[in-house]
Image (spheres, coloured by chain):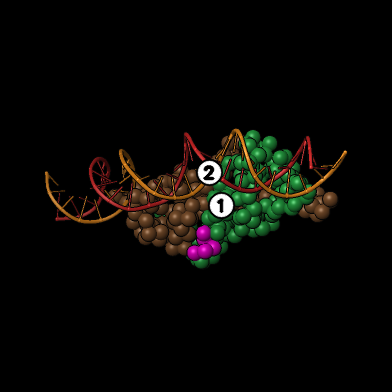
Chain colours: A brown, B green, C red, D orange
Amino acid sequence: MDITRQQTLADLLKALGEYNRLSLVYRLCECGQPQNAMCLCDCCSVDSSVASRHLKVLAQEGVVNIERRGRERIYSLNRSEVAAKLRELADFIDGDSEQSMQTERMTSNV
Amino acid sequence: MDITRQQTLADLLKALGEYNRLSLVYRLCECGQPQNAMCLCDCCSVDSSVASRHLKVLAQEGVVNIERRGRERIYSLNRSEVAAKLRELADFIDGDSEQSMQTERMTSNV
DNA sequence: GCTATATTTGCGCAAATACGCAAATATAGG
DNA sequence: CCTATATTTGCGTATTTGCGCAAATATAGC
């Protein structure tokens, strides 16, 4: 496995793995439409500066897109991309590749 | 969304979102069979104590199972469970539920 | 019991991280 | 230009986190 890809994936998971950031993602997911930061920062009751920083992290990892509209930033979820990456990892762990089949039942080979 | 579940999911993602811990998961995934900690700690070239702690975190989050065998601990991946949780999140983000369809194309409603 | 191996735990340290506040910046709208 | 609103940035702080080393613990095998 590519070391860089592994690091990139770890960064994505880390970005999603913080409670308030995950809350932002959930919020964007549930409300179904792009939101500005003021609106988003309600959902995790933190200072707007904190929300801004969290959203920046999410943007850096490609989780959200930013669209400038006047003095606002409109954030939208990168639904398909993020979902695809998560599924890719799930597939790898699941062992759709060869290595799982010889294992799943071999754990009792003591 | 349940706050506790959200926190649990965040914890899982955080556990996976650290480079060396993700390396351990990859290693367990690729070698296809359970491993002890000595063997695993090679893959991320850290002290065995560090590997032990990382594996403990992964075990707490249900990523790996521990089986005691003599003085060794044999770690195995909880493949299906972890993959299922990742897919669940992917599905949620993807928006298999109602809210996505009105959105995907509405992001251009400026 | 003694020794060797595997793992865990205590400790300290350095770096990263999340946070809030206040100031700075950007821009809409008068 | 002035004001109001939205966002970012600088700064200080408290907490968390990853790490290595050494000591402690557990167990296999003699």
Q: Start and end of the magenta stretch?
A: B3-7
Viewed as shown, does residue A81 lie left or right of A73?
right
Where residue A104 sits in the image (x, y, percent)? 77, 53
Q: Amino acid at mark 1?
A: Leu
> Would you say residue A14 is visible in this rendering?
yes
Q: Residues within 10 Å of mark 2 (few under 14, many from 20)?
A: many
Q: Are marks 2 and 1 in contact (CB under 8 Å)?
A: no
Q: Which mark is residue B13?
A: 1
Q: Which residue is found at the position 44% from the left and 63% from the top?
A: A31
Queried whether the magenta region covers residue B4, the answer comes back as yes
**Tag count in the figure?**
2
**Residue to which mark 2 is pinned:** A11
Q: Is residue D17 left or right of residue A99?
A: left
Please, which chain is the residue tagged with disc 2 on?
A
Q: Which of these two is toward me, A2 or B43?
A: B43
**Is B12 within the magenta?**
no
Residue A93 at x, y percent in the picture: 67, 50
CA–CA distance in space, label 2 to label 1: 10 Å
Relative to B99, is A38 above or below? above
